[in-house]
Amino acid sequence: MKNSELRNLSKDELVQKEKGLKEELYKLNMQRYSGRVEKPHMFSLLKRDIARIQTILNEKGMKSNG
């Protein structure tokens, strides 16, 4: 997902998106521990998207506070 797409979303949408990505990451981890990961490249992509969302949420939080 691109930064420009994420920046156009509201805080609530970003929080929901983050929850969904974390659930996906959890499911991938469960596959990892059971020994059958079909798409191992998804770990880094999901973590990167979660970090992007958290960064944007922090920026939006600072703008509203200060």
Image: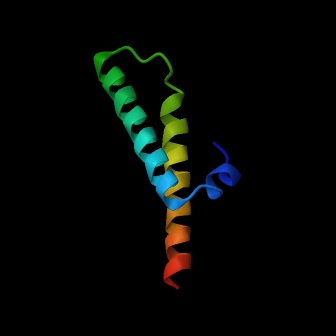
Quadrant position of residue 63: bottom right
Residue 2 placement, left or right of 53: right
Q: Residue 12: horizontal and vertical position, in percent?
A: 47, 57
**27 up-or-down from 66: above or below:** above
Q: Residue 64: horizontal and vertical position, in percent?
A: 52, 78
Residue 2 placement, left or right of 15: right
Quadrant position of residue 26: top left
**48 up-or-down from 4: above or below:** above
Residue 22 placement, left or right of 30: right
Taking depth in this image into account, of 1 and 29 the one nearest to the observer is 1
Looking at the image, which residue is at 54% across and 45% down?
48
**30 up-or-down from 34: above or below:** below
Q: Residue 35: horizontal and vertical position, in percent?
A: 33, 15
Looking at the image, which residue is at 55% across and 59% down?
10
Looking at the image, which residue is at 42% across and 33% down?
24
Taking depth in this image into account, of 13 and 34 the one nearest to the observer is 13
Q: Residue 11: horizontal and vertical position, in percent?
A: 50, 60
